[in-house]
Amino acid sequence: MKQPTSRTTIVAIATAGTLAAGMGLASAGAATAASGPRHQLQARPTWLGKAHAKGALPSGQTLSFSMLLGMRNQSGADAMVRALSDPSSPKYGKWLSLKQFDAAYGPREADITAVTSWARSHGLHVSSVAPSGMLVNVSGSTSTVNRVFATTMASYSFLGVTVRANTTALTFPSDTPAAVLTAVQGVVGLDTGATVKKPAATLPGPPPGGRYGVQPCSSYYGQKTAADQPAAYGKKWPYAVCGYTPKQLESAYGVDQQLKHGYSGKGQTVVITDAFAAPTIAADLRKYNAKYGLPQFKKGQFSQQTPGPDGYDLVSECGGNGWYGEETLDVEAVHSMAPGAKIVYAGAPDCASGLDNTWAAAIDNHTGDIITNSWGDGVDTVADLGQSYIDFYQQYSTEAALRGITVNFSTGDDGDQTSGGTDLGAKSLSFPSDLPYVTGVGGTSLDVDRKGAWTGEWGWQNAYAQLSPDGTSWVSPPGKYSSGGGGGTSQLFAQPWYQNGIVPTAVADYYGSTPMRATPDISTVGDPNTGLVVGETQQFPDGTYWDTYRIGGTSLSSPVMAGIVAVAGSRAHRTLGFVNPLYYSLLDSRALHDLKAPTQPLSQVRTDYVNGLDRSGGLHFELQRIDVQSSTLHDTRGWDSETGVGSPAAAFFRMAARR
């Protein structure tokens, strides 16, 4: 969190005009700003040095953003989180109401009034104030923003995407009241970091179709031996799982036994946040539930909160209907694990600041008891994210922990991000999964037998070997690293108390002598080759219709864990709230599977259509190596940076309810 001195530093305004002119941009903000010393609010984005300037934003363009007001007594809030979430504490589970949170830790009413009055007096429109008071949502024209903050708002090309940002540090006018300087922590949403707003009237239709889990494949691990494929490591391997069904995942994690006793997640509400909203989701869910023997949603059990078709932005920049599959996966995974839970889908207007604010609103409004988020930023440094953005997430995750809301974030699908689809050149986590008060959910490869029993589970880190040209051998197995659950050491946050003495020093002290936060905290099935079969309406060459396919990733792991938490909460007759201390207290108990790397190579053969649609283009075969050790993430005894404390076992529900 920023110190007050960083908000009141005196800066020279001439810098704004100089930098803007050097980039060939208009410097209206600098030219029209009031003379005299100004107060620094927020630094110039560091990533601008790697971007290409496209020009100043139109002066009349409306920019929506938020002013972040700092929490009070952060150290006291941290102490209270520990008291409320430590299973051994007498205050365990006595979560705060919004009124109690506001009274002890939220911004003062006088500070909120001072900030809103200041914003209006400088020509900004105040659209709303968050229930906690931590966000004042405002908008204004580019020219107004340039004048108020003495900068120039411009567009850039960065990593192949058009983005917007302030060309210089944001500063307050010299006559800004002390109450405003003290209250405002930073600005969120002016620096988009990834995309720039672009109005869109409607969303595109169903996404292009694809089929995964292609025959030959197995109904459970080891069912069909790939006898017609080459051997590897001295033996023949089975064809990959076609995709586990809801009933198979229920039995693997012991949910089926809870359902028999009436613990279905009833009384718990799970919130799913994503961008946009699938127009066919209601019909898709009915077909999915009918096909796989799940109870249909009762009236009011599933709902979508969306801004409406005229409220969506950044549709093409964000991938539009590509998010439909994410919503489908999340909803079907939660319902598969907790068929009695209420599910609220909170669809954001975009994948940038709109998604940030949608997530925060779910906490402020206490929309649910559990919030699952299958998305992230993919980076983990102040330089890439900006301190105000980090502060925003840290404050709201603190509020969630104090108010008894479980917050899950997927840890990402690129391992330590040094190879595979994302190579950042150095080990990194995916923010916000490393926030101390959220649960970073990692991924596993899951072995379920023909009776639905859990028979093995390993950290998800995949490599694939290709067939030789003559089809008689696999080329250099294990082959090239492909993907895996994220994990490792945070560069942002110190080690939280619940990890002290549990996370190995080699991981905690990776960046120096100060122990840091590490992820994941816990893991569930994520390997796309042992993933869940889902059903979604898609566009195929022969028409648009509902069909099923296999999918995985930590995008599956997070909602699966959310469903498990909901079932555990229904058995405990309460919400589990900030659950990390509970997970760590259960380490080395029967509540968890302590996952370890296989002692011998473990593989399966994956089948895909060459054209992604049907057999007309032929079949493609690959040899998957499960839990490949070419990654720096390894599952070992106890906590590890690949699977955290492990995965939930059948005894988890009983032992969690006793705490």
Image (cartoon, rainbow, N blue to C red):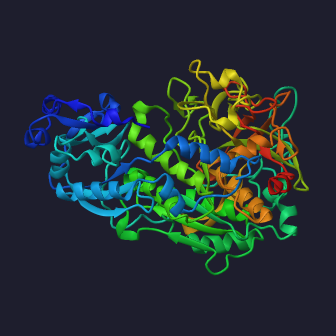
Asked whether 645 or 79 is in front, the reply is 79
Could you tell me which residue is drawn at 59 percent across and 40 percent down? 436
- Hey, which quadrant is residue 174 in on the image? top left
User: Measured from the top left, where is residue 139 in percent x and y?
Assistant: 26, 57
Image point (54%, 48%), residue name:
398
Q: Is residue 379 visible?
A: yes
242 on left or right of 578: right
Percent x, y of residue 647: 77, 44
Q: Quadrant of residue 18?
A: top left
Number of labelled discs? 0
| Placement of 503 over or under 353, stated as above or below | above
In the displayed image of the protein, which residue is found farthest to the bottom?
299
Q: Provide residue 621's location: percent of width, then percent of height.
A: 70, 40
Q: As drawn, which residue projects farthest toward the right?
A: 451
Q: Residue at x 85, y 57 (%)?
A: 251
Q: Quadrant of the N terminus?
A: top left
Left or right of 593 in this view: 641: left
Q: Nearer the viewer, residue 587 or 574?
A: 574
Which picture quadrant has residue 434? top right
Extreme top residue here?
513
Q: Is residue 207 visible?
A: no
Q: Nearer the viewer, residue 76 or 626?
A: 76
Using residue 310 as the reference point, say whether residue 506 is left or right of it.
right
In this picture, residue 2 sits left or right of residue 536: left
> Residue 543's x, y, as percent?
53, 68
Q: Relative to residue 176, is residue 289 depicted above or below?
A: below
Q: Is residue 131 above or below residue 219?
A: below
